[in-house]
Amino acid sequence: MVGVAQLVEHWLVVPVAAGSSPVIHPMFSRLTSGTTFSDTEVQRETSSESRVSPDVPWQTVVWNDPVNLMAYVTHVFRSYFGYPKPEAERLMLQVHHDGRAVVATGPREEMERHTEAMHEFGLWATVDRAGS
């Protein structure tokens, strides 16, 4: 069985330019410098450094703009998201005063659909990771 360090060395040795000697990325140089690590050590380090959780919630953010009236923004929040009038007005005022408001949180694909819908209503909106 090929050792992890040998696999790392094989895949991470990248030539700087054509005709030059290969250079190992500094982050991985300790893996190929003769030091041996057990498979669990390498796996633990790799998983903690490069793990991206797919279930991280995303959010649809509506931004303030100089074009749309506050009543219209409230109408969009009520008609599209189904918010009751007080909640729609609270979100609209947050957009107006703070410059932005998170109007929905959930899976990325759903937030992208909401953002596209906000664009179709003429509002400025983006998708962002929750907590950013």
Image (cartoon, grey):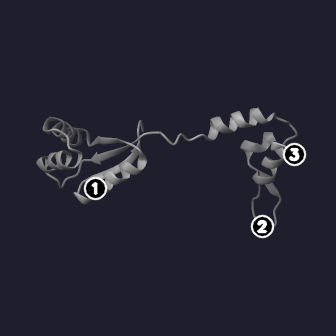
Q: Give me the residue at 68% from left, 39% from top.
A: 46
Q: How many marks?
A: 3
Residue 113: % across, % down: 34, 54
Which quarter of the figure is the C terminus placed in? top left
Q: Give me the residue at 80% from left, 49% from top.
A: 7
| Mark linked to residue 1 | 3
| Amino acid type for the residue under numbered disc 2 | Ala
Residue 1: % across, % down: 87, 45
Secondary structure of the residue carrying tag 1 is helix
Q: Give me the residue at 63% from left, 35% from top.
A: 48
Give the CA separation, mark 1 to mark 3.
53 Å
| Mark linked to residue 18 | 2
Counting other residues with Cα less than 10 Å from the Cα at mark 2, is it few (<14), some (14-19), or many (20 or more)?
Answer: few
Counting other residues with Cα less than 10 Å from the Cα at mark 3, is it few (<14), some (14-19), or many (20 or more)?
Answer: few
- Which mark is first along the chain, 3 or 2? 3
- Residue occupying the far left of the picture: 71
| Mark linked to residue 72 | none
Give above or below for 130 relative to 76.
above
Give the CA separation, mark 1 to mark 2.
48 Å
Secondary structure of the residue carrying tag 3 is loop
Residue 68: % across, % down: 17, 53
| Amino acid type for the residue under numbered disc 1 | Ala
| Mark linked to residue 117 | 1
